[in-house]
Image (cartoon, rainbow, N blue to C red):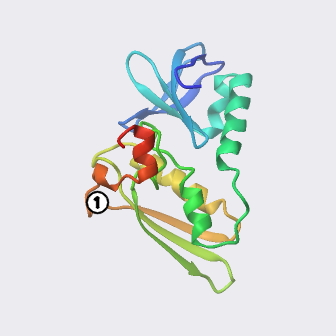
Amino acid sequence: MKNEEVTLTRECPATVIPAGDMVNLPRGGKYQIAQALGGSVTLRDATAMYRVAPEDLDALGEELHARIVVETAQQEDGEAKAFGEDRIWDALRGCFDPEIPINVVDLGLIYDLKLDQTEGNGHEVSVKMTLTAQGCGMGPVIAQDAQERIQAIPEVEKAEVKIVWDPPWSPRMISEEGKQILGLT
């Protein structure tokens, strides 16, 4: 799918990367797919890159939308696990930086994960994460994606994802798997 050309079938809201500004991409606009991971797609043209959220992927055309849905399901289709921290980590592995083809866990952006049981036998999840660069306008988008993925787990009553800057992120925090994806090993 990477580098595939796409013509939008309808006007499509998108987030400009890395500024984080919202724009409407025009119907008939021509773009190239930079990456399609975690259910969202990063498009690029001669001037910028744009993140298209999962709920707007139909603007890429019926056939391409169907392929993305299938690929996302295959990426996220793991063995069913009992509820616990592993399920939260798996949910976070479905969240990707729209510029880097590595999930936020393997990128080393997750600093802390806390899981508490509520009085009603549900769970509250608190995550501290960072970004690869301060001032990245995509921070709120990535944090919201992480929060929504955690909250989609039926046993989770509440999820909070907080962006922190201490310690500062560095490439040394990338997992071995992430380094392999980037060709750093």
**Eyeballing the image, is 169 above or below 42?**
below
Quarter placement of the N terminus: top right
Horizontal and vertical percent position of residue 72: 66, 41
Q: Which residue is mark 1?
A: 165
Quarter of the rendering containing residue 164: bottom left
Residue at the image position 28 percent from the left and 60 percent from the top: 165
170 and 130: which is toward the camera: 170
The answer to whether residue 3 is visible is yes
Quadrant housing the C terminus: top left
Q: Residue at x 26, y 63 (%)?
A: 167
Amino acid type at circle 1 is Trp
Q: Residues within 10 Å of mark 1 (few under 14, many from 20)?
A: some
Q: Is residue 21 above or below residue 88?
A: above
Kind of element beneath mark 1: loop
The residue positioned 57% from the left and 50% from the top of the image is: 94
Q: In which image quadrant can residue 61 be found?
A: top right
Q: Position of residue 34 (x, y in %)?
A: 49, 27
Q: Residue at x 64, y 45 (%)?
A: 75
From the top left corner, tell me how far across and down residue 152 is, in percent: 66, 59
Q: In this rendering, does residue 41 appear at all?
A: no
Q: Is residue 176 above or below residue 30?
A: below
Front residue of this view, candidates 58 and 88? 88
Tell me if residue 130 comes above or below residue 158 in the rendering.
above
User: How many marks can you see?
Assistant: 1
Image x and y of residue 11, in percent: 60, 22
- Residue 86 versus residue 152: which sits nearer the camera? 86
Residue pushed farthest bottom? Answer: 119
